Image: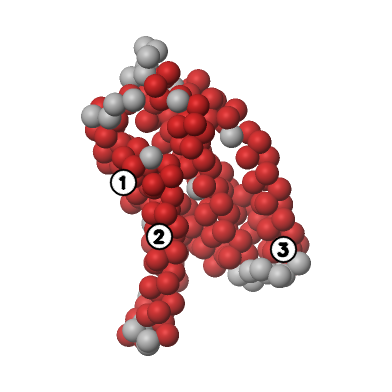
Amino acid sequence: MTGLIVKDFLVMRKSIKTYILFLLFYFVMAALGIFPISFITAMVQIIIMMLPLSAFSYDELSKWDRYAFSLPLSRRAVAGARYLFALILTLFAALFGLVTCLILSLAFHDSKLVENCMTVMVSLGLGLLYCDILLPLTYKLGPERARPYFYLVIFLPIVLLVGASKLGLLDGLSFLEQIPEASAIAFVLLLPLLPLLGMGVSYLISCRILEHKEF
């Protein structure tokens, strides 16, 4: 399975180098105060999550699955490697966000360090949730047909939240401000655990899809 993960990184190495430049660009934008750190951490997760979908596209273009399944490789191992690849990228995006928050907060004496780190954890949870939903969809539909769902999963919640805010539907949630800060921080820190556990269910669904799929 390690070889399969290394294969994904080798195939995507040019794209990863390009994305690293994007990360540096966003870091500079945050340092200059053009974008808030919370926006940067969310965007990093979205950008990084495009890499697994691109890996699917490269596999489909090169007929990799047909070749891989002619080898003594189980379909569970192939799916597991892709999930670990996505998990590594998601954790890397979260680590980048935390390091960015720490460096910029120390450099500019930003008092929102805790708030920004909580945003990173929420973004990590969302990144894991995207994996849970999009990886089985990609195995089922293929990378091109699944791509619109990627944008739908990302932007639909944002549109719904903005719309609810404009309509005043979120005014009734003012009681959330009364929650103790320690409890809120603990909840946010534990938030990524739920989609992380859900990744196991998502993996089993993907394995079942692969077992009934012909290449």
Location of residue 209 in the rendering, given as x and y in whole percent from the top left corner: 26, 34
From the viewer's perspective, is residue 157 above or below residue 85? below
Q: CA distance from mark 3 to mark 1?
A: 34 Å
Q: Amino acid at mark 3?
A: Met
Q: Position of residue 42 (x, y in %)?
A: 54, 60
Check if mark 2's residue and mark 1's residue have beta carbons within 8 Å.
Answer: no
* Residue occupying the point 41% across, 19% down: 68
SS of the residue at dot 3?
A: helix
Q: What's the residue at 37%, 80% (across, down)? A: 164
Q: Residues within 10 Å of mark 3 (few under 14, many from 20)?
A: some
Q: Which mark is residue 152?
A: 2
Instruction: Using the image, determine if residue 106 lies above or below residue 198.
Output: below
Task: Give whichever of discs 2 and 1 has the lower sequence position.
Answer: 2
Q: Which residue is mark 3?
A: 29
- The secondary element bearing badge 2 is classed as helix
* 2 vs 1, front mark: 2
* Residue 84 can be seen in this image: no
Depth order, front residue of 51/29: 51
Between residue 41 and residue 211, name the one nearer to us: 211
Q: Nearer the viewer, residue 57 or 97?
A: 57
Determine the image quadrant of residue 110.
bottom right
Circle 1 Cα neighbour tier, 10 Å, few/some/many (<14 / 14–19 / ≥20): some
Task: Tell me if residue 21 can be seen.
Answer: yes
Q: How is the image coloured?
A: secondary structure
> Along the line of sight, which residue is nearer the eye, 1 or 64?
64
Mark 3 to mark 2: distance in Å?
27 Å
Q: Quadrant of residue 204?
A: top left
Q: Are marks 3 and 2 in contact (CB under 8 Å)?
A: no
Give SS at disc 1: helix
The answer to whether 132 appears left or right of 119 in the picture is left
Residue visible at 38% across and 40% down in the picture: 142
Residue holding disc 1: 198
